[in-house]
Image (spheres, grey):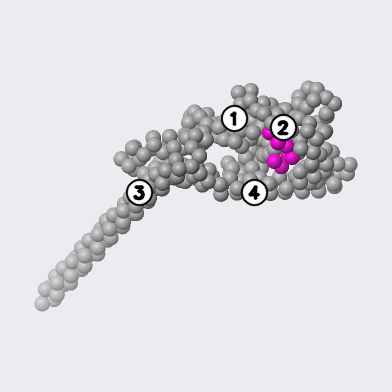
Amino acid sequence: MPPVPVPLDRPLALNIRPGGEVVLTGTCYLSHDGSTIDAATTHWPKEKPGGASVDPVGLVDHAASGLSLSSRDLEKHEYHYVFGGEASPACRAAGIEGACIVPSTMKLAIDRGIPSAEFLQKLKGAQGCLVAEVPAPTVADVAKPAFPFLAVALGVVGAGTVAFFALRARKRSLESPAGQLLALAKRVQAKVAGADVVTAAPLARAVEIAMRALKGGRVDPSSPEGARVQAVLLRVETALDNKQKQERAEEEKKAADELVAEVESALEAAEEAANIGARTKT
């Protein structure tokens, strides 16, 4: 059967038997940050900090969908998923008693700090850039409740369920060794960017290389090498923090010296004026 566009604002029902397969293909360009997103990955261009890289976060939450990834082709942006046979909580919340495709729109929007509606507006061809293809006689279609009020209720419940899974996945990601190490690298990169030129010059390139390695998955955060990278980044962060404290202390001392000098000068002027007034009276 021909490919079916995957809506990115609601779940899509799939009439697949247990063990059946669905193939997702296509890419979507996000003008908000210049990334290209397919079903399971986000591709960052070389112009971005850290250079070209791929993150394992895509337009579809396969865990919430009740699907498991069986194969993928990153060059073709083609992903094959298999239905295990049991409807996921997210699918059931949308009134779908079987396999479905749950979009990761809310999670991707939260990661970028923008509303889901704005995310979809900035996603080029949002309602046709990702397509699903299933073998005959499987039919894919969006579940349509019989009554309008039921549609509203299911929409609210479905959105809440998707948000719950997205937030929980994001929390797990941030709390994982990889998430913590990447957060440390981003924090250090921001502090390097805010440092003076003399300090930032020798550090910026090194931190950029570290970011690229982490985003590309070339360093295992739980390995001894990952621990070495973490130790080095912590040393850089500590050095930058100490330098900032020193600069702040020097600025405070300079401001205090200027204030004391101004007060002392004013006192001397006042005393001189008082002496002149006393001599005039005599």
Could you say whether the residue bearing mark 1 is in a helix, strand or loop?
strand
Residue of label 2? 81
Task: Tell me which amino acid carries mark 3.
Answer: Ala
Q: Residue 178 in the image: x percent, y percent?
A: 53, 43
Tell me the distance, in whole angstroms, between the alpha carbons under discs 3 and 1.
36 Å
> Callout 4: 10 Å neighbours few (<14), some, many (20+)?
few
Q: Residue at x 52, y 35 (%)?
A: 217
Q: Residue at x 39, y 44 (%)?
A: 232
The image shows residue 249, relative to residue 32, as above or below, that is: below
Mark seen at residue 36: 1
Task: Tell me which amino acid carries mark 2.
Answer: Tyr
Tell me the distance, in whole angstroms, between the alpha carbons under discs 2 and 1.
21 Å
Residue at the farthest right position: 146
Q: Residue 62 in the image: x percent, y percent?
A: 70, 38
Tell me the distance, in whole angstroms, between the alpha carbons under discs 2 and 3.
47 Å
Could you say whether the residue bearing mark 2 is in a helix, strand or loop?
strand
